[in-house]
Amino acid sequence: MVKLSVSLLCKSTSNLKRRKIDETPEQYLKQITHVYLNGKHLEDVGHEIFLCKSLKVLYLYENLLKEVPELSCLSQLTHLYLQNNNIERIERLSELKNLQKLFLSRNRITVVEGLEGLTSLQELRVDHQHLQPGEYLLFDERSIAAISETLNRLDVSGNGLETLEDLVPLRSLVYLYASNNQIGSVTTLIACLANWPELKELELQGNPVLNKPRAKDAIIVSTKSLEVLDEKPIPVPTRKFLESWNQCRGIRVLASALEAPVRTISTSQNSEISVLGIPEDARSAKVLQLTELSNEPQSGEHTVTSEDVEFKAPLQKKLEENGSVDWISCPLTLPSTEIVAPSDRGEAR
């Protein structure tokens, strides 16, 4: 075990601020704003750190800390890096009124708590906690409420979360990273997204919800401010296309439609076509649904390009008693990118 000392502190400062010959260690440390104690095998941080009265940035990641060190006297601290330790509980932070960034990734935290006094916190990273099998990260309501107006960047990836409902009060979120969890409900996810009007970047890769047909389309249409989804920018033409498609009711990217059992009808061509909602007048629709076909593989693949093409769509009101379908043709204008609609599902990908 390495014990923090005044000598170690003096050696762990920025090279931009060198100690003068006639300057005592105490005088020198009083002026220091950045201390680099990362990777020092520290199990504890003693009161020597209090000598750094002007400290703003403290690097303590990749040590052996089992608890958050006592830092209440560091009133000017704005950045605290504690990732890759063995911390089990968030505590002793309530006096850090100026703290803006708190990194606690890859520790052993089971509950996000103890944040009530952090009235300036803008970024919080609690991703990839070392949890027991079957456990998932919990969030204390009081802590979430305390940072709801200031927090704009949050990372909760890899924590076994099945929902993001506990994060709904964080209305100032701009960046949310929630990849590699167990989020599975489109309905619940979209309801949560509606509470974050400023959200620009979202990561959900590695969650079961993305295995559902058109889930990403539903997310894009439901979040007007979103610019990046799973590290990929959302092109303006893509958003406009999906929004127009949704407005025409040729595609139902509502969560209820995505999660509801698919209704099928039989056509005279012996294929099953799912009906998620067809316009009353298909001739007037600018964009029509690429209907999702049954899960059973069918032969053939249909490719639709950006040119105006004739696309045949079934009308519910045209169904005849014998199960056949009357077809009408109408122009379909698509974005410049090619959309491939396999005949077994009809998903645009």
Image: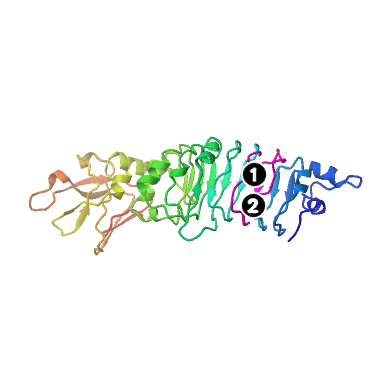
* Separation of marks 1 and 2 at Cα, in angstroms: 9 Å
Q: Quadrant of the N terminus?
A: bottom right
The amino acid pointed to by label 2 is Glu
The residue that label 1 is drawn on is: 92
Looking at the picture, tell me which residue is in the foreground, 92 or 58: 92
Q: Residue at x 64, y 52 (%)?
A: 67
| Looking at the image, residue 294 lies above or below residue 149 | below
Note whether residue 204 is visible: yes
159 and 1: which is toward the camera: 1
Find the magenta span and give its range.
67-95
- Do tag 1 and tag 2 residues touch (Cβ < 8 Å)? yes
The residue at the far right in this view is: 22
Taking the spot 24% from the left edge, 49% from the top edge, the residue there is 310
- Crowd class of label 1 (few under 14; some 14 to 19; many from 20; radius 10 Å): some
Amino acid at the residue labelled 1: Arg
Q: Is residue 310 above or below residue 342?
A: above
| Res 43 → quadrant | bottom right
Q: Which mark is residue 67?
A: 2
Q: Secondary structure at mark 1?
A: loop
* 81 part of magenta stretch: yes
Q: Which secondary structure, mark 2?
A: loop
Badge 2: few (under 14), some or many (20 or more) residues near its Cα, within 10 Å?
many
Residue 251 picture quarter: top left
